[in-house]
Image: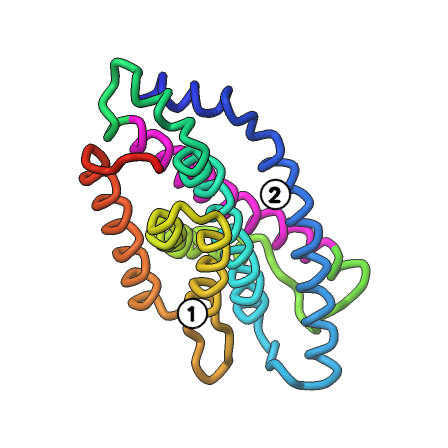
Amino acid sequence: MLHLLKLEIRKFNLGWYLKGAMIANIIITAVVCSVIYIAQREGDIPISTYQDVYVLIGASVRATFIVFASVLIAKLVIEEYKNRTILIMFTYPVSRKKLIASKLALITFLTFMTMMLSNIVVAGLFSIINIYFPIVPFTLTANQFIGEVINIIPFAIATTGTSLIPLYFGMRNYSVPATIGSSLLVVAIACYYNPEIPLVNFIPLQLGLAAVGVIIAYLGIRNIENVDAM
């Protein structure tokens, strides 16, 4: 499996993903700072504690990398079927299940790691910016920062599973637009942020969506021997 993962990394040159993640972190930080600044002035979104800040950061990061995961699914799985290049891989002396499992393992690993690191980076940047250009009337301490990083872990795990849901829509007709488009629908549900109905912070929903994603991935791997490229 590890050898297959290395082959996938070399084959697709995932430098674009890492560059995209870094650019996304900068954009997320700018958007979060702007939203919180405007919310403080207009009172549209109550930002009264550091937890409110981290919820908004977490929602933004998770939404971004659910979409990023759908792009990975499109490039590593859907396009391979659509362009029939997957047939070349099926000639390898390795089972189809292991080939697809290695692709999905790479996608989930990248999604989880970039979400964790991005949460840390964006929260850190926000804290630094808030010191020099006060956006919220309270300081984010180191202990609070560490505590929130720990709290992020179960949500990052759940979101990693949720990010596999677009695989179902993409595999139906080997459609890249359907794969990426469905991720926006997933984001609208999983990352819905409203102080009165905070679905983004409702762990039972997040775990439920993650379970759906894992089941979709499992069924995709289990039935792969019976699926032919178009």
* Residue occupying the far right of the picture: 132
| Percent coordinates x, y for residue 60 in the rendering | 56, 61
Residue found at x 36% / y 16%:
3
Q: Secondary structure at mark 1?
A: helix
Confirm or deny contact between disc 1 and disc 2 (CB under 8 A): no
Q: For the C terminus, which image quadrant?
A: top left
**Distance between mark 1 and mark 2 Cα atoms:** 22 Å
Q: Nearer the viewer, residue 185 or 230?
A: 230
Task: Judge left or right: residue 160 versus residue 145.
Answer: left
| Quadrant assignment, res 199 | bottom left
Q: Nearer the viewer, residue 14 or 169?
A: 169
Question: Which residues are the magenta region?
Answer: 99-128
Task: Judge left or right: residue 90 versus residue 82.
Answer: left
Residue 6 visible at all: yes
Task: Judge left or right: residue 138 versus residue 167.
Answer: right
Asked whether residue 62 is drawn in magenta, I would say: no
Residue found at x 31% / y 56%:
210
| Quadrant assignment, res 98 | top left
Q: For the N terminus, which image quadrant?
A: top left
How packed mark 1 is, by other alpha carbons closer than 10 Å (few <14, some 14-19, many 20 or more), is some
Q: Is residue 153 above or below residue 16?
A: below
Q: Nearer the viewer, residue 199 or 97?
A: 97
Q: Circle 2 is placed at which residue position?
A: 21
Q: Circle 1 is placed at which residue position?
A: 189
How is the structure coloured here? rainbow
Q: Earlier in the sequence, mark 1 or mark 2?
A: 2
